[in-house]
Amino acid sequence: MTTKELDEKYIAHTYARFPVEIIRGEGSLVWDEEGREYIDMGTGIAVNTFGHRDAAWVAAVREQMDRFQHTSNLYYTGPGARLAQAMCLATGMEKVFFANSGAEANECAIKAARKWAGTRKGPEYYNIITLKNSFHGRTLATLAATGQDAFHSQFTPMPEGFLYADPADPDSLRTLAASHNCAAILFEAVQGEGGVLPLPGAFVKAMEETAREYDLLLMADEVQIGNGRSGALYGYMNLGLAPDVVTTAKGLGGGLPIGACMLGRRAADVFTYGDHGSTFGANPIVCAGALSIFSRLTEDILSGVRTRSRLIFDRLTGAPGIRAVTGMGLMIGVETDRPAAEVVAACREQGVLVLTAKSKVRLLPALNIPMDLLEKALAVIRAACI
Ligand SMILES: Cc1ncc(COP(=O)(O)O)c(C=O)c1O
């Protein structure tokens, strides 16, 4: 049987796959089973930060594999401790809990907020305000946090304790905070799955004010936009915010599964032994690779992200068949005249892999995609939009 036949027969039908089997990757290029070459403008949905087979990441992972692979969290291990140190020093956060995915990082943030508010204000202060059109994951609590009914309908009852503010209406945030007992606000600097929509400035200001006024934790979901993709180390840094909790995943691991929940000063000591855990969390191989990625997110790389971002906006904004270009850094949404799925298919036929986000075409290239490949991909995308 072919891979496609095996997949159809044995893998649960939760993914509508593109008709391509990837068998090799190198930097920002991948090849399919027929030897066709593609420019990868999706990076496994914002995961392969420095592309495929990034030499330093491969070396860091290999080196750790040759030492030992896993111990459980019953023992001290170096890679996770060093990664947590690097993340705290770079962000000013104080503690890190490591998990294996974005959803789990957000689960940790939700638990942290409930315990923090419960201890400080009382157990009835459990509500977390998230945003309409947000996306926070597929576990039940993070689905409930996700402000999109379409994700909830067949999986009810949803865990309670989530309220949804409208990013277009900053007053909706204040109204919710005033009328419910709340613990925290959870937000994405750019709503990724929601259509690559940066948060409006008025809402950002309202979040800061409301969190202060109602004594709420401000929690940034940096699962998709984080780790250099925004042109800053984390997307909230572009908004001038100082969140109390930051969750991240995807690009931090560079291709191996990781999630991290960073706790700032106000929440640093919220957890005690036994409050939370994960068998694979802080896996040494994953963390050794992640440290290699994280420690290379230098100002040089970030300024390269901003340069590439400007190029994308410049080449696509106002081009025929393109209605709007939205996003931040190298997380970009393109609103097209043609249905996004048609543009994605046309790009693929011309050797460029792009994604969708709601009705938009979504671009999430590697932070170091070579400029000539980026130009080539943008020319293909422009032609596919007509
Ligand atoms: C903002 C955001 N939060 C959480 C998640 C869930 O991450 P994971 O699929 O690693 O659980 C995603 C995934 O796309 C995301 O974009």
Image (cartoon, grey):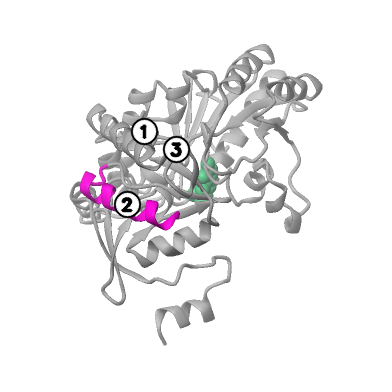
Tell me which secondary structure the magenta stretch mostly adopts. Answer: helix
Asked whether mark 3 and ligand 1 are closer than 8 Å, the reply comes as yes
Task: Name the foreground residue: 175 vs 279.
Answer: 175
Mark 2, secondary structure of its residue: helix
Tell me the distance, in whole angstroms, between the alpha carbons under discs 2 and 3: 25 Å
- Residue at image coords 44%, 47%: 320
According to the picture, the residue beneath numbered tag 2 turns out to be 379
Image depth: mark 2 or mark 3 in front: 2
Question: Horizontal placement of 207 versus 86: left or right?
Answer: right
Q: Position of residue 195 (x, y in %)?
A: 55, 44
User: Dot 3 lies on which element?
Assistant: loop
Image mark for residue 84:
1
Circle 3 is placed at which residue position?
Answer: 225
Q: Residue furthest right?
A: 179
The range drawn in magenta is 368-386
Q: Which mark is residue 285?
A: none
